Amino acid sequence: MSSDAITIQGLQVQEKPWVDTLHEWVTTVDHKRLGILYIVYALVFLLLGGIEALIIRIQLMHSHNNFVSPQVFNRMFTMHGTTMIFFVVMPVLFGFANYLVPLMIGARDMAFPRLNAFSFWLSAFGGILLYFSFLGGSGLYGAGNAPDVGWWAYAPLGARAFSPGHSSDYWTLALLVSGFGSIGTAINIIATILCLRCPGMKLSRMPLLAWLNLVMAGMVLITITPLSAAQIMLLIDRYLGGHFFDTQAGGSAVLWMHFFWIFGHPEVYILMIPAFAFLSEIIPVFSRKPIFGYPVMVAATVSIGLVSTSVWAHHMFTVGMNSYANSFFAITTMAIGVPTGIKIFNWIGTMWGGRIQFKVPMLFCIGFLFQFLIAGLTGIMQAAVPFDWQLSLSYFVVAHFHYMIVGAILFALFGAFYYWYPKMTGRMLSERLGKWHFWFFLIGFHLTFDVMHVPGLLGMPRRIYTYEPGRGWDTLNLIVSIGAFIQAIAVLVFVWNLISSYFKGAKAGNDPWDAWTLEWSTSSPPPAYNFATVPIVASRRPLWDLKHPEDPDSQYE
Amino acid sequence: MFALSSVLLPPRALAEHTHAPLTSIFSPESTPAKSILDLSTFVLVITGIIFVVVVTLLGYSILKFRATSVNADREPAQVYGSNQIELAWTIIPVLIVVVLFLATARVIHAIQDAPEPAGAVEVTAIGHQYWWEFRYPKLGIVTANELHIPVSDPSNPTPTFLRLLSADTDHSFWIPELAGKTDLVPNHPNRMWIDPHRTGIFLGQCAQYCGTQHAKMLLRVSVDSPQDFAAWVRGQQQAAVQDSSAMAGRQIFEHTACINCHTVSPTPADGRFGPDLTHLMSRTTIAAGAAENTPENLRLWIQNPDAIKPGSLMPAMKLSDADLDAVAIYMETLR
């Protein structure tokens, strides 16, 4: 990307041979380049995970289909889930955090640039390890060539008795390695936000994106740790004769579930809170109003972060906990709906009375609000424990969490791409292609995931490679699969837009959206040092103050 | 949400008329499933109201506050928040949560903490990769994959209490019309109960991913009238039929690996790894519901299980045609 001639304050830099450019990118410690590396890396894995999803959907198009064997199907859903969570959504969000946080708080880089590069390359090698299992996972004869234990690898399926060979070791190592990368990035984000804010930027003046990423990074520190611990315990079981999760020798399958979900549920919010962060920046700009209720938005985020660490066992309502434990996790899970509801209302409050511009980033944010509402409500249904005894482990749950991860997080991410791509590349993404992308994806999404709730209510469990005819699931599954292909077309339009706009898009200029946060005060793309002079801020919207000297925000503080 | 439930109503109506086996959670036939549906309906109504209110607010703000050519060049009034409004939309959700929680806790307690009455039928269900073992400790019966239980008359309840165990990985017992699901977890015995209010066949399947053939670990519950159930119990308590015409097959069965995994009591075959075959012919399906119990399927299953259920733990026996015929004939005598 940097082979173009770059102009820095009138100084012409010569075009370099591509090997030098490659070398620069591999050895870079610049937060912007690492951010872009994270994002590009995640997009590659998005395509891989998407192909796996399409294989799953082809197999389930009708009952007793034989497109793939059960062994291959089980590998596909394991790899799809692991890829999408750990190697698509997490890195892409870290990429945006890396790119945006220093720019938005007026810093010149992250606090620990080399730790930043180290963390990225750890995560990158984690993903490569996972996919290497397709080639090198056999180890023993008859063993699978990729992990097939499901993305949460419930004990004792991950024990050697049920998972011989090395395929699930690759899964374990991939998560362990990328987990260390995540912890490094989290430490970096926290240190950057706490130590490198520009003069005048008190915590109470920080853009919400920085606040939300601070909370997210804190949650990463708390929750990746038990996951890493569990992975190490699993390796001890598998190679050193431990019996933590080895039920054949008195180990506990339930212990693994607790370890996994005390990571796994906060993880949902680790992915969701940065998506909230995008909305909290994009909606105000396109509504032409400041965020409604900034202090409450911060408080709601912090309380989501805290409460989310006490809801994990709602993944385990069918496991046979006693009625008191079930009731406890029901109330904590329902309670998290309150701060989440506040957020939805405050975003609507931001739009209320505004002058809403329906540019592509805003379209995706409105899609987010609609889908996130539904996903939240189906979440409340599953918090009603007895209702969950029917819904859990069925396709209803699959529809629910895809509503969260695709309908909410991915929509917010697409919005973020359209919003910040001009800053990252200096060129606008095509609005026309963007609208095609939005509408195709919206239609495909609703075809797939609205309909997917129904087979769950009709008794279809998740993770089955085939199903019996005559249960009323055939037509529904066919519609779900058709929707998946429409989404795939939309993603291809998006990728094409990313590539073609990079070469042919309209020049963006510093501030194409007439926005208010510091990243829009520097050039697009920003120079390596971000700001020629360190900015000084007096309110939450420094660029508003510049543009409206007659009515600056700072006079209301 | 409401549109969703109206989509699901036709199968329910169908069930009332024809008693076709269905797996919808909206046609409950047992007390736990009924009280779950009552709670679910309540939750659906509350969430439906929230949905309508919020979507109205969202839709109104999208339609009403669009930028137009008239106002696009001016910035709107800059409003930073409102403590009263934000307090209101904090307190109302809190109240909703309290109501939902109380309704939920009541049903959790009613289902999960129900005492076991004296006349209850006790069954131990053991999940295996990829089949179900059912043992009736009080009745001395062992069978597989097809659970027989008596219908429970509300005036004289005879519920069935299931003790859930696993021999290997996690499984989950789910018959949507009779109850919510409960997992079978190794080293973690669980309990659940059902009291079906009508006779008939109820279907379900393993709901917790348990390995390669998770998909074909089907469940079939036959709810019998008290007389039929008593007759079935008497039949299952008999020793295996000793039919001299099938002696050749029996010898092959007892001299190959079959008996390492299968029991035919009271013969020397006493393996416990696979389903008990003492009364194989009393079951309508084989391979945990993956195929109907017909002579052709039985032959195919013995010779090449992967043809019916790829990845099943039953090995291909590779018998000669004559031996295969003999074993199949022996199996068909195990009524």
Image: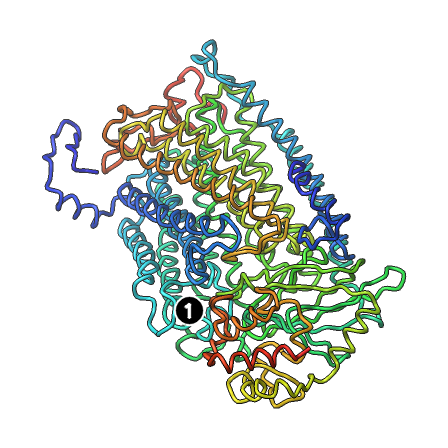
Taking the image as shown, residue A149 lies to the left or right of residue A10, namely right
Seen in the picture, residue B206 relative to A551 is either above or below; the reply is: below
Instruction: Identify the image quadrant of the N terminus of chain B.
Output: top right
Q: Amino acid at mark 1?
A: Ile
Residue A236 appears left or right of B156:
left
Q: Quadrant of residue B228?
A: bottom right
Position of the C terminus of chain B, as image quadrant, is bottom right
| Residue A467 occupies quadrant | bottom right
Q: Residue B222: x percent and y percent?
A: 73, 64
Residue B200's quadrant in the figure?
bottom right
The answer to whether residue A191 is seen in the rendering is no
Instruction: Tell me if residue A325 can be seen.
Output: yes
Q: Position of residue A445 (x, y in %)?
A: 49, 38
Query: Is residue A497 left or right of B313 when viewed as pictured?
Result: left
* Residue nearest the viewer, comparing A325 with A417: A417
In which chain is the residue bearing label 1?
A
